[in-house]
Image: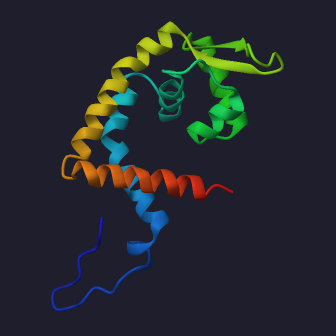
């Protein structure tokens, strides 16, 4: 939220008003705020949601790969996966390609729990992006993907 200038006074530009990192964080917060309520109402934390959303349509991921994908530290994610496994939402299995690796996969219960949220996430995204043209949305997503890829250490 921006501060409004006092009557008769001109507001000077603030650093954060044009700082990319702040603008990205502000946009992320604004986009997720309403959908976050849906996630909490489904009994999930935002990190549990990201894990289940990431696993919903793939054949599993190692904890390290999953941690990078859901933006979590590996020890934090390992503890979370343990809790989610105890709750029956995910399971671990040996990687069929590399027996040294263990994969985390969503169980049928985990997929069922996240299915409604996946549909709601798409609907929410459509509502948020309604003011933009198809070309603007494609350009925005392309820029964000490129930025994420090039900004990695």
Which residue appears farthest toward the right when viewing the image? 100
Residue 109 at x, y percent in the picture: 48, 9
Give the camera-side residue of 153 and 35.
153
Give the vertical position of 73 relative to 78 (above or below).
below
Which residue appears farthest toward the left when viewing the image? 7
Give the vertical position of 18 relative to 113 (above or below).
below
Quarter of the image that includes the N terminus: bottom left
Q: Is residue 4 left or right of residue 51?
A: left
Which residue appears farthest toward the front when viewing the image? 135
Q: Quadrant of residue 6?
A: bottom left
Give the camera-side residue of 93 and 110.
93
Residue 129 at x, y percent in the picture: 25, 47
What residue is drawn where x is 64% and y is 40%? Answer: 68
Residue 78 at x, y percent in the picture: 70, 28
Q: Is residue 4 left or right of residue 107?
A: left
Give the camera-side residue of 94 and 72.
94
Q: Quadrant of residue 34?
A: top left
Give the vertical position of 18 relative to 106 (above or below).
below
What residue is drawn where x is 79% and y is 19%? Answer: 98
Q: Quadrant of residue 107?
A: top right
Quarter of the image that includes the C terminus: bottom right
What residue is drawn where x is 50% and y is 32%? Answer: 50
Residue 29 at x, y percent in the picture: 39, 50
Q: Is residue 104 left or right of residue 4?
A: right
């Amino acid at each position: 939220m921006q501060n409004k200038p006092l009557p008769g006074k001109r507001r000077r530009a603030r650093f954060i008003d044009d700082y990319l990192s702040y603008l990205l964080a502000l946009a992320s917060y604004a986009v997720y705020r309403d959908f976050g309520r849906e996630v909490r109402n489904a009994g999930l934390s935002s990190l549990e949601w990201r894990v289940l959303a990431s696993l919903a349509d793939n054949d599993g991921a190692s904890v390290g790969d999953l941690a990078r994908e859901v933006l979590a530290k590996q020890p934090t994610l390992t503890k979370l996966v343990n809790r989610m496994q105890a709750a029956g939402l995910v399971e671990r299995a040996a990687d069929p390609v590399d027996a040294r690796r263990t994969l985390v996969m969503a169980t049928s219960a985990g997929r069922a729990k996240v299915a409604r949220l996946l549909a709601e996430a798409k609907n929410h995204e459509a509502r948020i992006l309604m003011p933009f043209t198809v070309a603007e949305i494609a350009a925005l997503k392309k820029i964000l993907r490129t930025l994420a890829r090039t900004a990695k250490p």
